[in-house]
Image (cartoon, rainbow, N blue to C red):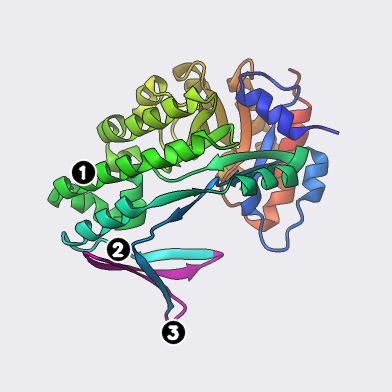
Amino acid sequence: MRNHREEIELALSGGAPGIIPLTFYDGLFPPGFDPAPLQAKGMALCCRRGVFNRLTPNVKTTQVEEPDGGLRIIYETPVGRVESLSKKAALAYAPVEHPIKTRDDYRVVKFIVGDMRYEPVYDFYLGEIEKVGTAGKVICGTVYEPLMDIQVTWIGQEQFCYELADNEDAVLELHEAIAENHKQMYDVVADSPADYVLYGGNVVPEMLGPDRVRDFIAPTWNAFGERLHDKGKKIGCHLDANNHTILDTVRESLLDFVEAFTPPPDCTVSVARAREAWPGKRLWINFPSSVHLESDEDIRQATLEIVRQAGDRKGFLMGVTEDIPAQHIDRSISVILETLRGCPR
């Protein structure tokens, strides 16, 4: 019986297991889907879990269910209030309105992020490790980097672009406040049982601009990375978009591994190019989602090509980090697993 946890840890430490690990986010299985048959064929689990709860003791947060099924969240602070609205979409809520709508809202959000505290939940994390056992790897999920947090949580992607043009000073002031607050989180995670930590991701360089990734996002990777490295832990980022304009930034950063990296045909950077551009960094790819819909032979050939480009396979893993239509999961994952088993080291 394969010990998937050991295989994943070997690859993340720079080694090469006998068979390249193929992991699947445990939170992506459709309702009612039984992963056991695929696990019996060799599929491992990747389980992202937290080591803290976030608290805002001086902010009153109220959730209101709207008649149409939406969820409104109201944040009341000593300096004012903001609110957001989300609509139910599939298994989760999708934001429709974000808290920051006017320049005055920055002051309120700045209070909220400054009030945020991080309560350790280390026993929960240890319990999840025990629960998963050798079936996969539990890694620590944290939060978005400050600039991505502003974009995704507080403003929204489209309006964020306008805010950079119209209120850049307010955006950067909020960025500084979040970055300062995250230092508390760095300490809580560094002292936790987690050995591999994910910080941020979903970075779209075409939207942010590669210079902003270099000047604002990478420094936060490095600040957290320094704290984690002091405790013998590793830091990674969920970089699942077109990374061709930030190859140098990632190479020069303190990131130890890049997770959810997506090669062509879905994104622009091949496995071979990433391996060449990021020597010494572990590469944990997302098998390109569009290929899951192709024929068995196309899936097999795509798998073989990815393995070929991975070279010596040291520090290399495959994963599934995006939704696959339920009717294609068993077929596609079975083909990938069979192909990986047949690849000589």
Q: Earlier in the sequence, mark 2 or mark 1?
A: 2
| Residue type, numbered disc 1 | Leu
| Residue type, numbered disc 2 | Pro
Does residue 261 appear in the picture of this structure?
A: no
Give the percent coordinates (x, y) of residue 287.
Answer: 59, 38
Marks 1 and 2: in contact by CB < 8 Å? no
Residue labelled with disc 3:
67
Give the percent coordinates (x, y) of residue 49.
Answer: 58, 46
Q: Earlier in the sequence, mark 1 or mark 3?
A: 3
Residue labelled with disc 1:
172
In the foreground, 201 or 340: 201
Residue at x 41%, y 36% (from the top left corner) = 242
Judging from the image, what secondary structure is the residue with disc 2 in? loop
Above or below for 333 versus 268: below
Residue at x 43%, y 42% (from the top left corner) = 185
Q: Earlier in the sequence, mark 2 or mark 3?
A: 3
Give the percent coordinates (x, y) of residue 9.
Answer: 66, 28
Separation of disc 2 and disc 3 at Cα?
Answer: 20 Å
Instruction: Provide the residue span drawn in magenta.
Output: 66-91
The stretch drawn in magenta includes residue 72: yes
In this rendering, which labeled residue sits more in front, label 1 or label 3?
Answer: 1
| Residue type, numbered disc 3 | Pro
